């Protein structure tokens, strides 16, 4: 097969492929023989249908299928071998519609190509990019430590009420002919909408009777009143007066102790021996997570910096819109709406590809597996589970790697992490220390 390419301009080309009889004859004849074995026709035994009859009824379709296979293999082989930096897929020209497939003849096909723009994505020490070190505050450490302690906490009965305690008792409506009354009612006064009503429970003890107004306390919330008074929903707002609440029990959630059992549970291995050690390890844990977040922000800043440095690239807009139109089921409005964003993403994709190649970034199966483990650990860490058994971790990773889409996403993350590490060594980092609040605002 003879294939040639003609550059119309920097970003547009036409590729021409001439399929000769020598390219397809043997494969076409083999396909006819295979068809003869499978085709059933009335009046003929299986496998005995004359070749001429098969050609007459099915020959053009069989020939078209074989020519198309040869054409696709030849085109993409040529594009690969000649390193044609093509965007999207080759677009067949209207001339191809007039090609009639007749055995023994040559067929000429033409395709339009969208060519990627040429540019040089080069970064060195002259390039300055921001890098943010996030300060881990004492409050952040305290909050994390408290979260671990809550996992080992429990509810205990106490003598007098304090904010955030839970009270249980009997509620009785006052000054009505048929009062509502319910036993075993549980309340958390902290969540009252009215501060004056909350204050009525301050310092209360078991067996005390507190007079309060539930309707005011819950700001006439129908759902809250229905649950509290144990009445029908449609009747809840009819009880706007005062009630007595006789406290039968006060319970308080008490966090677990900061002891060796908790230290070993969160950080197995016996390295943590004291509260100071524990807090230091928690701080290190939070800090390591922020390093990952800072690295991600660094890549975003690299993207912005290098995109502005290279400037606006020239793209074959007409052809790209045709490709997008085909990929979006002919929805022109959607293509017009998303085109600028698509070009923005395509620009970064091309830049990143070049940076990955120049920095010799490689990803293998072990990288993907480690990234899958890290993703799994992060997912469980959100629920306070830091130490996942190896067997469970391996099974979880095995399930993740069954999906092609998941593997592709993991590969992308591996590339991004390795690229970020390489570029941090190449450019000049403009480092600054910021609070977590300041850092998070950068993503708004």
Image (spheres, rainbow, N blue to C red):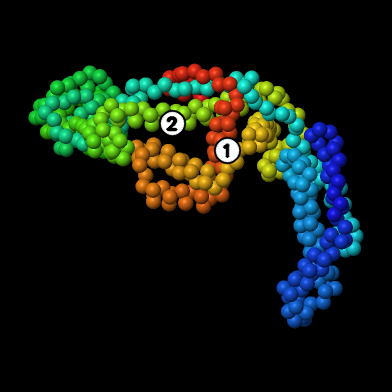
**Residue 151 occupies quadrant:** top left
**Residue 69 occupies quadrant:** bottom right
Q: Is residue 276 left or right of residue 328?
A: left
Of the pair 56 and 38, the residue shown nearer to us: 38
Residue beneath the point at 22% across and 24% down: 163
Of the pair 389 and 32, the residue shown nearer to us: 389
**For the residue carrying disc 2, how many other residues have a C-alpha within 10 Å: few (<14), some (14-19), or many (20+)?**
few
Q: Is residue 86 left or right of residue 268?
A: right
Helix, strand or loop under label 2 = helix
Residue beneath the point at 47% across and 22% down: 133
The label on residue 102 is none
For this orientation, the residue located farthest to the right is 105
Image location of residue 230, percent across then percent down: 22, 37
Give the labeled residue for mark 2.
Answer: 289
Q: Is residue 34 left or right of residue 208?
A: right
Q: Is residue 415 left or right of residue 285?
A: right
Residue beneath the point at 36% across and 39% down: 386
**Residue 436 occupies quadrant:** top left
379 vs 187: above or below: below
- Res 336 seen here: yes
For this orientation, the residue located farthest to the left is 207
Of the pair 439 and 268, the residue shown nearer to us: 268
Give the labeled residue for mark 1.
Answer: 415
């Amino acid at each position: 097969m003879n294939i040639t390419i003609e550059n119309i301009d920097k970003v547009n080309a036409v590729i021409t492929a001439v399929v000769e009889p020598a390219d397809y004859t043997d494969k076409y004849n083999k396909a006819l023989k295979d068809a003869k074995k499978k085709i059933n026709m009335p009046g003929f035994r299986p496998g005995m249908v004359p070749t001429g009859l098969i050609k007459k009824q099915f020959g053009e379709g069989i020939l078209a299928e074989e020519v198309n296979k040869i054409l696709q293999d030849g085109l993409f082989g040529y594009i690969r071998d000649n390193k044609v930096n093509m965007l999207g897929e080759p677009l067949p020209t209207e001339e191809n519609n007039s090609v009639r497939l007749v055995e023994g003849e040559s067929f000429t096909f033409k395709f339009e190509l969208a060519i990627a723009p040429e540019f040089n994505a080069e970064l060195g020490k002259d390039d300055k990019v921001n890098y943010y070190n996030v300060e881990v505050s004492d409050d952040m450490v305290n909050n994390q430590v408290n979260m671990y302690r809550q996992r080992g906490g429990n509810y205990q009965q106490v003598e007098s009420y304090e904010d955030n305690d839970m009270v249980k008792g009997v509620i009785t409506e006052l000054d009505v002919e048929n009062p509502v009354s319910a036993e075993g009612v549980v309340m958390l006064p902290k969540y009252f909408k009215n501060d004056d009503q909350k204050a009525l429970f301050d310092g209360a003890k078991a067996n005390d009777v507190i007079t309060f107004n539930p309707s005011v306390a819950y700001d006439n919330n129908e759902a809250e009143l229905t649950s509290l008074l144990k009445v029908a929903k449609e009747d809840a707002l009819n009880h706007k007066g005062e009630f007595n609440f006789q406290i039968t029990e006060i319970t308080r959630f008490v966090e677990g102790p900061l002891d060796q059992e908790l230290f070993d549970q969160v950080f197995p291995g016996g390295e943590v021996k004291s509260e100071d050690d524990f807090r230091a390890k928690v701080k290190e844990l939070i800090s390591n997570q922020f390093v990952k977040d800072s690295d991600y922000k660094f890549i975003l800043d690299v993207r912005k910096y290098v995109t502005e440095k290279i400037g606006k690239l020239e793209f074959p807009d007409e052809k790209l819109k045709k490709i997008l139109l085909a990929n979006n089921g002919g929805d022109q409005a959607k293509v017009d709406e998303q085109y600028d964003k698509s070009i923005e993403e395509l620009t970064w994709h091309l830049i990143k590809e070049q940076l990955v190649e120049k920095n010799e970034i490689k990803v293998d199966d072990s990288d993907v597996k480690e990234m899958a483990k890290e993703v799994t650990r992060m997912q469980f860490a959100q629920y306070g589970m830091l130490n996942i058994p190896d067997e469970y971790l391996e099974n979880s990773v095995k399930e993740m790697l069954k999906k092609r889409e998941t593997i592709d996403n993991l590969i992308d993350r591996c590339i991004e992490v390795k690229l970020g590490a390489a570029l941090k060594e190449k450019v000049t980092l403009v480092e600054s220390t910021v609070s977590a609040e300041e850092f998070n605002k950068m993503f708004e």
